[in-house]
C-alpha cells in the first residue's frame, strides 16, 4: 500500500516532490497560530504508513513542536507507522555533553518524537561527527536512515569546474570529499579544523598544490559560513583558479553569510533544497523517494 505523504508547514514543495516521485498522495494539513503563539494543526484522516515531511529551518523549535503535534495527531487519525522525513535535521550537533549540566539535545528531541509516535527518521547527509547512525538509533526506539546528496552536488559542480581538486574543511567531511573526488575522477584532501569557541574556529593551513587548479569545497552544513570562508581564503592565497563550494544544507544564518563567501573569493555556491535558498540547485526529493521505497 502506498504511504500517505503529509506535508509539514516548513517545506510543502519537498513533500510534493517526494509524493510525485513515488506516485503517492500528498496531504497538506492546515497549520495555524493562535494569537498567543500556540500551534494549531488540522489534518485529514490517514491509513497505513504516513511519511511526514518537515525540515527544521528556519525555526527549529517551532518545527519540532509542529512535528510532535502532527505525529501524535497522525497516530490518532489512523497511521500505523510514521516515518519523519527531516531533510535538514537540527540538534544533531548537540550530541555530546561537553560541559557539566549541558543538555544532549538530540537525545531529548528523539524522546519527544518517540512519545509522539514517530517510528523512523530519514534525513540527508546527517551531521554524524561523533556518533554513527546506529548510536543515534540507540538513543530511542526511532530508527534512523540516511541518504546523501553528494553525488548530485558533485555532478552539478562538475558542470562548472575543470578537473577540480576536492577539499573538505575537516576530517569529518572526508566521506563526502572522497566520494565527490571519485565521481569527478580527481584527488581530494581534508583540512584540519579546530573549534576555539562556539563562535570561533581555526583552519590549519596545509601544503596543497592548488595553484591554477579549480577547486570544489564540499561540506554538509554552511551555517555562519565561517568554516567555508576560511577555506576559500586559504585556497585563494595558494593561487587556486575557480572555487565552488557545494553543501547539502544551506542554513546561511546571518544576513551576510553568502556575501561573505563571495567576498572571500568563491566563484560558485551550490546547495540542495533541504533548506530552500538561492543556491538550491539539487532537489533531494527524488533521492529521498528512492530510499523510502526500500523502507516501505
Ligand atoms: C561542522 O563540523 C560542520 O560540518 C560544518 O562545517 C559547520 O557546521 C559549518 O558551520 P559554519 O558555517 O558556522 O562555520
Image: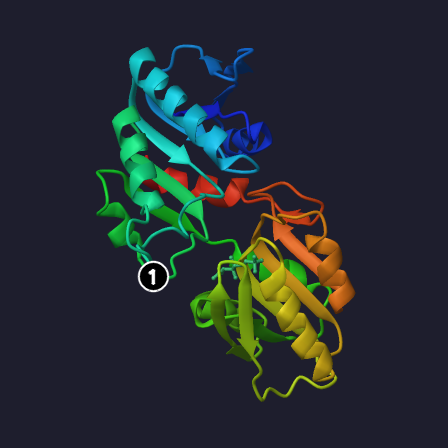
Residue at position x 72%, y 78% from top? 236
Residue denoted by label 1: 130
Depth check, front residue: 232 or 34: 34
State the colouring used for the structure image.
rainbow
Quadrant assignment, res 140: top left
Query: Is 33 situated above or below 8?
Result: above
Please state if 273 lies on the left or on the right of 72 as rendered: right
Query: Is 27 situated above or below 274?
Result: above
User: Label 1: few (<14), some or many (≥20) within 10 Å?
Assistant: few
Question: What is the total number of numbered labels drawn onto the structure image?
Answer: 1
Please state if 51 lies on the left or on the right of 245 as rendered: left
Quadrant occupied by the N terminus: top left
- Tag 1, which secondary structure? loop
Quadrant occupied by the C terminus: top left
Residue at position x 71%, y 54% from top? 258
Residue at position x 69%, y 58% from top? 269
Would you say the beta carbon of the disc 1 residue lies within 8 angstroms of ligand 1?
no
Depth check, front residue: 116 or 293: 116
Residue at position x 48%, y 67% from top? 195
Instruction: State whether residue 163 appears in this view.
Output: no
Q: Where is residue 136 in the image (x, y as percent from the top left)?
A: 28, 49
Q: Position of residue 55 (x, y in %)?
A: 50, 36
Quadrant assignment, res 244: bottom right
Instruction: State whether residue 66 appears in this view.
Output: yes
Depth check, front residue: 198 or 258: 198
Please state if 127 lies on the left or on the right of 100 as rendered: right
Query: Is 116 situated above or below 193?
Result: above
Depth check, front residue: 163 or 91: 91
Q: Which residue extends farthest front?
A: 100
Q: Where is residue 235 in the image (x, y as percent from the top left)?
A: 67, 78
Amino acid at each position: 500500500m502506498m504511504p500517505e505523504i503529509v506535508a509539514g508547514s516548513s517545506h510543502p514543495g519537498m513533500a510534493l516532490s517526494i509524493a510525485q516521485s513515488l506516485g503517492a498522495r500528498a496531504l497538506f494539513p492546515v497549520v495555524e497560530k493562535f494569537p498567543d503563539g500556540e500551534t494549531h494543526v488540522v489534518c485529514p484522516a490517514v491509513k497505513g504508513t504516513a511519511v511526514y515531511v518537515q525540515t527544521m529551518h528556519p525555526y527549529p523549535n517551532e518545527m519540532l513542536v509542529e512535528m510532535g503535534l502532527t505525529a501524535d495527531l497522525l497516530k490518532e487519525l489512523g497511521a500505523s507507522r510514521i516515518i519523519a522525513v527531516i531533510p535538514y535535521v537540527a540538534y544533531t550537533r548537540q550530541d555530546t555533553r561537553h560541559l557539566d549540566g549541558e543538555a544532549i539535545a538530540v537525545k531529548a528531541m528523539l524522546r519527544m518524537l518517540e512519545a509522539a509516535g514517530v517510528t523512523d527518521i530519514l534525513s540527508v547527509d546527517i551531521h554524524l561527527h561523533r556518533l554513527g547512525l546506529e548510536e543515534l538509533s540507540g538513543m530511542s526506539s526511532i530508527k534512523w536512515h540516511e541518504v546523501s546528496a553528494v553525488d548530485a552536488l558533485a555532478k552539478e559542480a562538475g558542470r562548472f569546474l575543470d578537473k577540480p581538486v576536492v577539499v573538505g574543511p575537516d576530517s569529518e567531511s572526508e566521506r563526502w570529499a572522497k566520494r565527490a573526488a571519485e565521481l569527478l575522477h580527481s584527488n581530494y584532501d581534508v583540512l584540519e579544523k579546530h573549534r576555539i569557541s562556539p563562535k570561533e574556529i581555526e583552519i590549519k593551513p596545509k601544503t596543497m598544490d592548488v595553484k591554477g587548479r579549480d577547486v570544489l569545497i564540499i561540506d554538509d552544513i554552511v551555517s555562519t559560513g565561517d568554516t567555508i570562508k576560511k577555506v576559500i581564503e586559504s585556497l585563494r592565497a595558494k593561487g587556486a583558479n575557480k572555487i565552488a563550494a557545494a553543501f547539502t544544507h544551506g542554513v546561511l544564518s546571518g544576513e551576510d553569510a553568502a556575501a561573505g563567501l563571495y567576498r572571500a573569493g568563491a566563484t560558485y555556491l551550490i546547495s540542495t533544497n533541504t533548506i530552500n535558498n538561492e543556491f538550491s540547485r539539487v532537489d533531494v526529493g527524488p533521492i529521498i523517494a528512492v530510499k523510502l521505497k526500500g523502507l516501505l
